[in-house]
Amino acid sequence: MTPAQIAEAAELLIQASRNRKSMADLPAALRPADMDQAEAVSNAVQAKVIAHVGGWKIGASDATARAKLGLPRPFIGRIDTSRIHTSPARLVFASLMAPKLECEFCFKLARDLPPRGKAYGRDEVLAAVASLHPGIEIPELRIDSGNSLGMFAVIIDQGGAGSYVLGPAAQGWQSADLGKAEAVLRINGEEKARGPGSFAMGNPIDSLAWLANARAAAGDGLKAGQIVSTGSCTGILPAKPGDKVEADFGPFGKALVDFLS
């Protein structure tokens, strides 16, 4: 894709987001051929629609899932500060675009992790963490299902970034193996999915370290106060008007959101 094609594809997605009306597909000439091109479109979109980066989301954090999707690496989305909500949250369903649900371990940073000449180690990244939280990522899709883009449809679309519900700070997590910790997703009181923290690159801490180094290499780094959602433990489920959703992380707490009709 040329820079002009990247900009044109990004503008179509931006208009869909602003109009709150999803698009069926991209024109053939504007479809990315690989992940680098898809990420270039995503970056162009996010540069214009994210007023203030309050956090980051990591998609396709599970190696098995990436292999099935044919992706060489996880992908990234920025979360606008205005889209981060404190649990228990109440969101108007009609204001969202095809919202989905994911349970994710989420870190809040106490200090910056800026670009530098060498990679950050796991312990360095861990030392920059202020707190761990249970989280519900609510991806939104600005491109209809049935498009020709496959997984690139999510990657170009801000990584599917939408809203985020942040639960209270967890206690005692520093001495726990977060890879073995489990999240349970309940909708209207019924269990719909569960999965371990190991789906986030083996351990949510390793997912955070990967992002810190990816953003340092990109030249912006991570900032104090930002959150990092480390990847889905439960897979992706659809939300419906009226749903009452609970993400239960056991000893690490819960995050709650109701979708108002």
Image: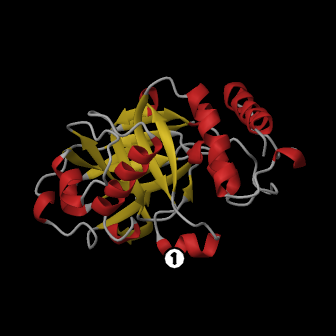
Whether residue 188 can be seen here: no
Frontmost residue, 14 versus 164: 14
Q: Position of residue 144 (x, y in %)?
A: 76, 48
Q: Which residue is mark 1?
A: 64
Question: At 80% from the left edge and 49% from the top edge, which residue is drawn?
Answer: 31
Q: Position of residue 60 (x, y in %)?
A: 52, 62
Question: At 31% from the left edge and 54% from the top edge, which residue is drawn?
Answer: 119
State left or right for residue 169 relative to residue 151: left
Say which quadrant the C terminus sits in: top right
Q: Residue 71, located in which quarter of the rendered image?
A: bottom right
Numbered disc total: 1
Asked which secondary structure carries label 1, the reply is: helix
Q: Position of residue 25 (x, y in %)?
A: 82, 47
Q: Residue 237, located in which quarter of the rendered image?
A: bottom right
Frontmost residue, 10 versus 170: 10
Residue lying furthest front in this view? 117
Amino acid on which the number 1 mark rests in the picture? Thr
